[in-house]
Each structure stands twice: as C-alpha cells, then as structure tokens.
C-alpha cells in the first residue's frame, strides 16, 4: 500500500535537488550530442534545395519557341505552309512559357500561314489563345487588325492593314531580322493569295501587290551588294516555284545572277549610300535600311 503523494518542491533547494534527479549530469551532457543536429540538418537539406533560385545558365536558357524558330523559318522560306502549321501548332500548345514574348516567333508565322491558306477561323483561334500580356504587343495588334479586316471582308482595309504591318516588321525597332524577313514575305504572299478570294476590282489588287514588290525590290537594291535568290523571293512574297519570275524582274533591272551559287547581284547605283561588302554584311543592317527608307515612300 502506497503512502500519501510527495508534495511538490517548494523551496529553491528542493527545486534544485529535483532538477538534478530528473536530468542527471550524464543526460545533460548528452543533450547537445551531434546525432540529433545531423538528423535535423539532413531533414532540412531538401527544403533548402527546393527554394534555390535558378542559376544564371538556367535563366538564359532558350525557350521552346526560340528552339523551334529555325525550323519555322526554313519551312516558311520553302513555302511549306502545311508543315509550318503543324510544327508551330505543336510548339505553341506545348510551350512552357506561355506569356514569354518569344512565343510570337511561332504565333506570327502561324497566323499568317493560316491566312495565306484562307483558314481564318484557326488563325483567329491562335490569336485568342494568347494571354493578355502578349495581345498588347504591336505585332499582335497588327495581326489582329489584319485578320479582323479580312474576316469582315473590308477589302480596302485589308490592304491598308497589310501595308501597315509590312512597314512595321521592317522597322529598326522590330529587333529580329530573320523574323522580319519571313513576315514581310508572308504578308506579300497573303495579299497575293487574297486577290484570288475576291472578285472586286482585281486590277487595283494587282496594283497593290506590284507596289509592295516594287518598293521592296528597290530597297533591296540599296541594302545589299549580293543576296541569295531564296531570300529575295522571301522578301518579295514569291513562292519557291516562282524563281523564274523573280529572275525576270531582277534581270530587267540589270541585276546579275550566278546560277551556280544562286546569288543575285544588284546593279550599281549612283547613290550616296555605301552598301556592305556582300550578303555577309549584317542582315539587320540591311533590314534597317529598308525600314528607314520605307517610311518616306508613298503607298
């Protein structure tokens, strides 16, 4: 039979004695042992790794849109619009950075490809997929306006919007020379294809296309000392099977053509502008010249 419970310690001496009884010196010494701290450190390590910011290499890594752009560029240059649509659609839908401006490397050629193919609903769907932050970019707005005029069959506005967009992509501030080349050519191609979808005043439509091409051709004459035939076709909005037409225009303007290298050489011009040594010059420099001059030309 147990006795009455021991009263709790009350005096300072009793409290100190109780503490020594509950935590002997050996246990007290063992308390700061390294094992618990190592365990705690190991448990905390994964959490520390999870919140690490990305390294410099990661932040500079190309987006999926940038990685796919060379393929898009090649397909546009060869006029393989169906293949371009397939590649761009897959890339746009599977991209990891939906709000990144580089997404327009795929979206802009994709929209114009659909429009050249006269598939306006898919073109509109592509644009409506964009997040708000990308719809305010001037290139997106230009595509929206061109598509809207086309859907609503506002014929005069179609050519106006096409010309505005054509001039915009050739501005020095556009920033991407290769994309500028592709879009400039695709816009002219769209105007040419659009001609076949309407019956109203075809003579004025032909005149509009001819004006696009004449202006671009004159500016290319000043921007390059030599230029590949394929690039000239892209700028002028001709398809790969229209090389003969480009050559006829070039030769009529006293350009020279090397059939082996497929390089066009513009005729010498009496101008104060000094061109580069050849196609190896900065393509952006050539585009900038086109843009600086195009603003002073009338439609």
Image: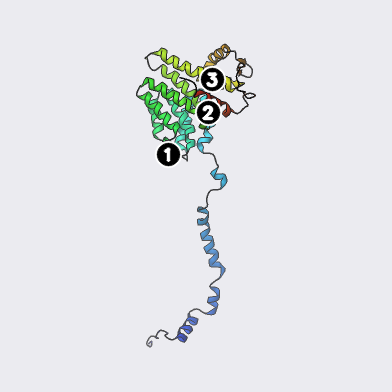
The residue shown at (52%, 56%) is 48
Q: Secondary structure at mark 3?
A: helix
Residue 277 point in image, percent of width and height: 65, 24
Q: Secondary structure at mark 2?
A: helix
Task: Compute the Cα span from label 2 to label 1.
Answer: 25 Å
The residue shown at (54%, 13%) is 249
Q: Label 3 neighbourhood size at 10 Å, few (<14), some (14-19), many (20+)?
A: many
Relative to 171, 115 lies left or right: left
Residue at the farthest left position: 152
On screen, residue 34 above or below 262: below
Could you say which is closer to the camera, residue 259 or residue 141?
141
Task: Compute the Cα span from label 1 to label 3.
Answer: 34 Å
Kindly tell me whether residue 25 is visible in this rendering.
Answer: yes
Which residue corresponds to mark 2? 73
Which quadrant of the view contains residue 221?
Answer: top right
Residue 156 point in image, percent of width and height: 38, 20
Image disc number at residue 233: 3
Image disc number at residue 43: none
The numbered mark, 2 or 1, whose residue comes first in the sequence reads: 2
The residue shown at (53%, 54%) is 49
Q: Quadrant of the N terminus?
A: bottom left
Q: Quadrant of the C terminus?
A: top left
Residue 44 point in image, percent of width and height: 51, 60
Which residue corresponds to mark 1? 133
Q: Secondary structure at mark 1?
A: helix
Which quadrant of the view contains residue 246?
Answer: top right
Q: Label 1 neighbourhood size at 10 Å, few (<14), some (14-19), many (20+)?
A: few
The numbered mark, 3 or 2, whose residue comes first in the sequence reads: 2
Between disc 2 and disc 1, the foreground one is 1
């Amino acid at each position: 039979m147990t006795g009455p419970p021991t009263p709790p310690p009350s005096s300072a001496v009793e409290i100190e004695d109780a503490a020594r009884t509950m935590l002997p010196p050996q246990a007290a010494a063992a308390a700061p042992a390294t094992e618990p701290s190592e365990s705690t450190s190991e448990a905390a390590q994964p959490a520390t790794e999870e919140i690490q910011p990305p390294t410099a290499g990661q932040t500079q890594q190309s987006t999926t849109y940038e990685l796919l752009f060379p393929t898009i560029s090649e397909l546009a240059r060869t006029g393989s619009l169906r293949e371009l649509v397939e590649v761009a659609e897959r890339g746009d839908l599977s991209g990891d950075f939906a709000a990144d401006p580089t997404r327009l490397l795929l979206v802009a050629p994709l929209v114009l490809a659909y429009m050249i193919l006269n598939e306006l609903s898919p073109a509109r769907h592509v644009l409506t997929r964009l997040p708000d932050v990308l719809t305010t970019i001037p290139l997106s707005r230009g595509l929206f306006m061109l598509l809207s005029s086309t859907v609503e069959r506002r014929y005069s506005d179609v050519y106006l919007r096409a010309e505005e967009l054509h001039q915009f992509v050739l501005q020095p501030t556009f920033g991407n020379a290769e994309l500028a080349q592709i879009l400039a050519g695709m816009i002219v191609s769209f105007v040419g294809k659009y001609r076949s979808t309407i019956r109203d005043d075809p003579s004025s439509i032909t005149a509009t296309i001819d004006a696009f091409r004449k202006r671009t051709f004159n500016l290319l004459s000043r921007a390059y000392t030599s230029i590949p035939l394929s690039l000239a076709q892209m700028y002028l909005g001709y398809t790969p099977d229209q090389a003969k037409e480009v050559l006829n225009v070039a030769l009529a303007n006293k350009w020279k053509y090397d059939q082996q290298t497929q390089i066009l050489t513009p005729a010498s011009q009496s101008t104060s502008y000094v061109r580069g040594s050849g196609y190896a010059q900065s393509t952006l420099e050539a585009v900038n010249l086109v843009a600086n001059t195009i603003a002073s030309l009338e439609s």
